Amino acid sequence: MKKFINAPDDVVREALAGVAAAHADLRVDVSNQIVVRTDAPVAGKVGLVSGGGSGHEPLHGGFVGAGMLDAAAPGEIFTSPVPDQILAATKAVDGGAGVVHIVKNYTGDVLNFQMAAELALDDGVRVETVLVDDDVAVENSTWTAGRRGTGATLIVEKVAGAAAAEGQALEAVAGVGRRINESSASFAVALTACTTPAAGKPGFDLPDDEMEVGVGIHGEPGRRREKLLSAKEIVRIAYDAIQSAKPLQPADRVIVIVNGLGATPLIELYLLFGEVAAVLKDAGVEIVRNLVGNYVTSLDMAGMSVTVCRADDEILRLWDAPVRTPALRWGT
Amino acid sequence: MKKFINAPDDVVREALAGVAAAHADLRVDVSNQIVVRTDAPVAGKVGLVSGGGSGHEPLHGGFVGAGMLDAAAPGEIFTSPVPDQILAATKAVDGGAGVVHIVKNYTGDVLNFQMAAELALDDGVRVETVLVDDDVAVENSTWTAGRRGTGATLIVEKVAGAAAAEGQALEAVAGVGRRINESSASFAVALTACTTPAAGKPGFDLPDDEMEVGVGIHGEPGRRREKLLSAKEIVRIAYDAIQSAKPLQPADRVIVIVNGLGATPLIELYLLFGEVAAVLKDAGVEIVRNLVGNYVTSLDMAGMSVTVCRADDEILRLWDAPVRTPALRWGT
């Protein structure tokens, strides 16, 4: 294992210490693993909390800040945060208008966020939950009942974050988050496995000439292995999977994210985005916003995901609203 | 070789097609490999052009936009752009106030930018050149006479770009760029070699338990190989190298970039930043601005660089000025 770390057990806390040193806008409780906006709670504003296993950076800590999340609760690597941790984050951002939990659909995350929501309610904090399950590669997986939550999570966080920032009520903020999830589809392909610090070796073996199609963000299996194809062919596989699960129509307007899984260089991501743009143009679908880069990663996995989100004027207005976080920033 | 590409010879142009599809603010001449702000030339403003071999993305194309570069001329992978290409970029951004070339110190880049500057002068465009040679790892290398240009390039581009945007004259813009270079030092460590599409295999062999200390951004050798150390020890090596080449003093204020070389996950970069922050705190040096992420890369190399730039009020004012590019954006 080749990593810039000190000891496997210390990776998450030491990385959080780095986040704390880098970002004066964030209050980082390193020992309890909670990242909160320094100005939280904002009185009268719906709070937004997300979290999940670490190893997907910048998700979620990198999306904490004005116009997006109020707090993140990162677990150990590929391990759900515990209920008390989520509860502490929830109470830290409750400004009296309730809190939205944005939860990727993994069994551990779902259970622990649910327990935290119940504990919060006992303390008088109303919680609405937005479950994200945008990954159309598999219907169920080793880590989930139902589809997995992946790249669309950041769109949910951005758009719901903007809705909360402009003063929308709890149900409305959760509602627009759910609408993003329903309107989104993602599909990922891996060229290599990732290595967790604890395991010290790749999570699966993949021959030099093969790729994992429909892979998840924890190295969990996808649909199938097959021989490595060209970028154009890989994008076609992803597009076909998205089209059969959540069909796009001509004249649809979409937000597209071409996302690196951690070890894929930006030059390849832009090449892939060019292929995605060509396929969608042929389909009559208009890309109205896009991101190309590493946003929802899987440690050091070489791989990419494509996320497509159908967007109307309201969603685009909220997408374009100012945001100021470590990993996403505009308008401020 | 596992990459998301179609054919090795088409990588740069196809990636540029993706850049064109992603960024409406940029005018991309895919066949001539030039990336220009759509609103260039800006009358009366000093133009800024940089370039160099591709494979270092987002450098340089990702830094084209308001407040930073006016144009970039990306060569083939790890290959200098040709003089005609640089000349075309120079003329495209000349608003009558002259053009600054920001050139990383590699022999091919230096020669080709020099030739382009002479050709531009023949066409009546004054050019000042800022040579960047911040990498303190080696005094000379297989690719250079003198020190190599690496991570400080983006600080030069940001600060000189802000000076140009506020209407400073040619000599002043070049002057502040040179001042950044003189005030900056970088040092890099690689855990793996990178693989160019043309070569199809890693540029060097590095045993599973070794790292390349003082590596360059083309996989060129560094100072030495040694056994893999902890993040804390690696940061200490980088700090000692910087201190012996360009000593920092207590009470110095610095901009710090902890930069990934392409395949290193963000969680490791933040962990490294925490170590850098601890070392500088012990030295009485204050980190006043920072970036943590992939900014000056070396394709799919697992590795990191640390750049430290001593900054005064004027430099910080220019650093904080609005910038709107694909890879760096704030205040707009």
Image: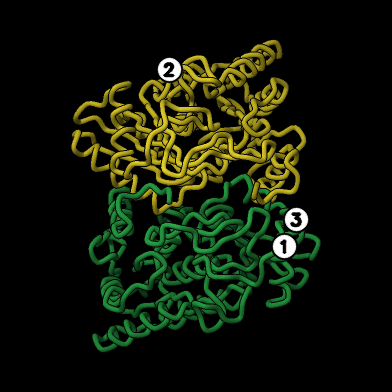
Chain colours: A yellow, B green
The answer to whether residue B25 is visible is: no
Is there one chain holding both mark 3 and mark 1? yes
Who comes first in sequence, dot 3 or dot 1? 3
Is there one chain holding both mark 2 and mark 3? no
Q: What residue is shown at x 67% (from left), y 58% (from top)?
A: B210
Q: Chain of mark 1?
A: B
Would you name the residue on which mark 1 appears? B286
Residue type, mark 1 in image: Glu
Q: Position of residue A140 (x, y in %)?
A: 47, 17
Q: What residue is shown at x 70% (from left), y 63% (from top)?
A: B226
Q: Is residue B267 above or below residue A188?
A: below
Count neighbours of disc 1 (C-alpha within 10 A) and say few if under 14, some if 14 to 19, many if 20 or more.
some
Q: Position of residue B327 (x, y in %)?
A: 45, 54
> Would residue A264 appear left or right of B4 to someone viewing this image?
right
Residue type, mark 3 in image: Lys
Would you name the residue on which mark 3 appears? B232
Distance, label 2 to label 3, CA atoms, is 43 Å
